[in-house]
Image (cartoon, helix red, strand yellow):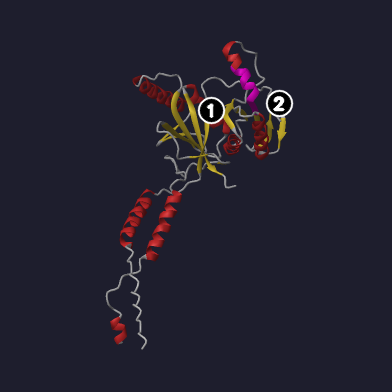
Amino acid sequence: MSRRRRGMGLTDPNLTPLLDVILQLITFFMMLIHFGTKIEGATRAIRLPTAPAGLPSSELGLDRLIVAIDAEGRLLVGPETLEGRSAGSWWADEARRRRRGQDVLGDPDDELPTLVVLRADKEVAYGVVRRTLVAAQSVGFAHFTLLVLRSQH
Amino acid sequence: MATRHTRPRPEPPEEVAFPVTPMLDMAFQLLAFFVLTFQVPSREARLDLYLPAGPVALPGQGKPATGPTASRAESDLETSLVVRAEADAGGKLKSLRLGEAPLPDSEALGDSLRRYAALLEGRPLRVVLVADDALRYEVAADLVGTCSTAGAEAIHLADPTPKGEGTGAP
């Protein structure tokens, strides 16, 4: 008992294992921080198709327009759902607004620099996606990105 | 009488205390930074398409043009390949062709494009994808991704309605 009492004096805690664990955690987070991250507009309603490779989704420019196409082929823009002519007029409005901005900057060009990011459901017909791209293309958008899931193999 | 030499006793080694606390503080700060800025890794990837407003000219289709457009079209002919994908009633891939050569699947397409890109010796490879509108987008995205990873610098999505003849393929 006396020996035990003697040992209860002020002792430094061994911090080395704690430091080891923390450095491991830091390494873990540092390794993951460079991976692609989700672009805004991700929703469970849209199931992206799987495609080989593709670029990581984190290196997109600031001037971008994110749209989605659901399994029924409707164009989703934020909370709005557009179909048929309303979708066409929406593309025209967006192009007009951006062109006005370009005019203010003194950079008038037929081709808009905006990147159109398209998140389309894998079950939708390819024709719907193609016609959406054509609708955007016809008002001046030229840069597109299709979002997919990277295949595992 | 022999004198007795007494050796000086070696001093006990000086204990150096390693200051762990500042290092731990810094490590905690770093950890807090990474935890707060952490975002869940995603499998999302992107396939870039450059689709200028002009209509896509299928190689071997239409009349020969003149002027600067003609020279551009001619240079396109050398490096552009047509990939045709037909869909069955369920939207699945029924047939796949590179030019006129039938291919079993997208992997074979990737292999052929890679071999063709090697033959081009640095010149840009362009692919025109002519796919049925009824094809499921999942299949089409797979084809676009395959073309992109095989080295195609530009992928055009052509309207499948006007049926034209494509160029030969390896």
In the picture shown, does residue A18 fall above or below B147?
A: below
In the picture shown, does residue B92 fall above or below B37?
A: above
In the picture shown, does residue B145 fall above or below B120?
A: below
Q: Position of residue A76 (x, y in %)?
A: 45, 35
Q: Chain of mark 1?
A: A
Name the disc covering residue B168, or none.
Answer: 2
What amino acid is labelled 2 in the image?
Gly
| Quarter of the rendering containing residue B120 | top right
* Picture quarter with the N terminus of chain A: bottom left
Q: Nearer the viewer, residue A88 or B48?
A: B48
| Residue under the image location 65 percent in, 16 percent down | B62
Q: Number of labelled discs?
A: 2
Dominant secondary structure, magenta: helix
Asked if residue A118 is among those painted magenta in the image, a careful observer would answer no
Magenta-drawn segment: B72-82
Q: Position of residue B23 (x, y in %)?
A: 33, 58
What amino acid is labelled 1 in the image?
Arg
Q: Chain of mark 2?
A: B
| Residue under the image location 67 percent in, 37 percent down | B111
Name the disc covering residue A52, or none.
Answer: none
Q: Nearer the viewer, residue A23 or B85?
A: A23
What secondary structure is found at the residue carrying circle 1? helix
Q: Position of residue B81 (x, y in %)?
A: 65, 27
Q: Which residue is mark 1?
A: A131
Q: CA distance from mark 2 to mark 1?
A: 28 Å
Q: Residue furthest front?
A: B1
| Residue under the image location 35 percent in, 79 percent down | B7
Q: Position of residue A37 (x, y in %)?
A: 45, 44
Q: Residues within 10 Å of mark 1 (few under 14, many from 20)?
A: some
| Quarter of the rendering containing residue A11 | bottom left
Q: Nearer the viewer, residue B14 or B19?
A: B14
What secondary structure is found at the residue carrying circle 2? loop
